[in-house]
Image: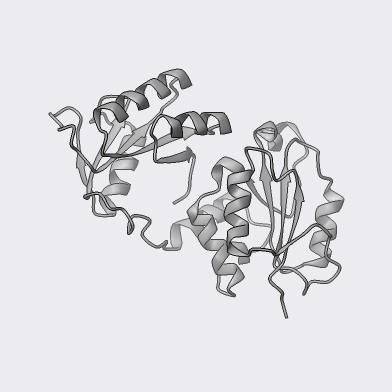
């Protein structure tokens, strides 16, 4: 019978790993092991936090697979490992995530797996990216907006101040929030500063200083709104700066919902 323990390896207290590490151990407090399991029944899964490419060898993963053939191995990659699949020697047999990709969707899927229910982490280790995409597209996820206290109005901001162009990202965001029952508005019209819905800002490929300045302006203009920023591969220092500027939610692109 499985116990409620997980195996963890790596420098988990690095700033970029702490948010992910804390969210995981909240689900199973006091359940961390730093000893590679010898039997498949000992652990629920394994977590490797990789600070740099090559920190862990394939032999470590192979030992975990041999000891836990039915338990998932999650590899969290720090920013120094970006591009590893092209320029390095990526580890095989793991579910690979850059730390900025971890979100409530995967947290939910991990909880399902640990409770003996079908989930993303019950799938074979040999999945290709297209098979992963099909899984995400087919599986419903509980409404992430059930706890939203604001009204169901949403402004989608692109190029930091305009809305209504035909960019694919704009259309995707508008369709997504409309699907969850939001009324999509436009900054092209007069919006009261008392607006207390959601503002979703797509950072495009703007330089980070411009993104930060624009967020500060949005927060100044809409003090009561919830601000969500979609940004490419945010670094930990960028996340901190955005949060200090008043951002409520940071979503890394690309992302599965």
Q: Is residue 28 above or below residue 129?
A: below
Q: Judge whether residue 100 can be spotted in this image.
A: yes
Displayed quadrant of residue 66: bottom right
- Residue 39: percent from left, percent from top: 83, 71
**What colour scheme has been applied to the protein in the rendered image?**
one colour
Displayed quadrant of residue 197: top left
In the image: residue 60, left or right of residue 168: right
For the point 28% across and 36% down, the residue is 156
- Residue 206: percent from left, percent from top: 43, 21
In the image: residue 109, left or right of residue 180: right
Displayed quadrant of residue 121: bottom right
Screen quadrant of the N terminus: bottom right
Of all residues, the one furthest to the left in this rendering is 190
Camera-side residue of 102 and 151:
151
In the image: residue 216, left or right of residue 123: left
How many marks the image carries: the answer is 0
For the point 77% across and 75% down, the residue is 41
In the image: residue 239, left or right of residue 141: right
Q: Is residue 36 above or below residue 100?
A: below
Q: Judge whether residue 168 can be spotted in this image.
A: no
Q: Is residue 141 above or below residue 191?
A: below
For the point 36% across and 36% down, the residue is 169
Of all residues, the one furthest to the bottom in this rendering is 1
- Residue 48: percent from left, percent from top: 73, 50
- Residue 232: percent from left, percent from top: 50, 32
Camera-side residue of 5 and 76:
5
For the point 20% across and 29% down, the residue is 187
């Amino acid at each position: 019978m499985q116990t409620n323990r997980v195996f963890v390896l790596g420098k988990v207290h690095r700033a970029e790993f702490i948010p992910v590490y804390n969210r995981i151990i909240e689900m199973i407090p006091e359940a961390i092991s730093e000893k590679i399991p010898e039997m498949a029944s000992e652990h629920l899964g394994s977590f490797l936090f990789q600070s740099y490419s090559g920190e862990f060898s394939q032999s470590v993963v192979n030992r975990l697979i041999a000891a836990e053939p039915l338990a998932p191995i999650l590899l969290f990659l720090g920013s120094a490992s970006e591009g590893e699949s092209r320029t390095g020697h990526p580890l095989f047999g793991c579910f690979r995530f850059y730390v900025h990709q971890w979100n409530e969707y995967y947290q939910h899927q991990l909880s399902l797996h640990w409770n003996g229910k079908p989930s993303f982490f019950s799938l074979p280790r040999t999945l290709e990216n297209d098979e992963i995409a099909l899984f995400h597209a087919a599986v419903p996820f509980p409404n992430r907006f059930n706890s939203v206290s604001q009204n169901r109005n949403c402004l989608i901001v692109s190029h930091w101040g305009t809305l209504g162009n035909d960019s694919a990202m704009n259309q995707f965001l508008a369709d997504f929030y409309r699907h969850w029952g939001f009324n999509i508005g436009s900054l092209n019209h007069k919006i009261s500063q008392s607006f207390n819905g959601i503002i979703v800002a797509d950072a495009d490929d703007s330089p980070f200083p411009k993104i930060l300045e624009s967020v500060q302006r949005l927060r100044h203009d809409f003090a009561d709104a919830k601000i969500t920023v979609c940004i490419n591969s945010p670094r930990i220092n960028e996340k901190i700066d955005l949060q200090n500027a008043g951002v409520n939610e940071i979503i890394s692109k690309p992302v599965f919902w």
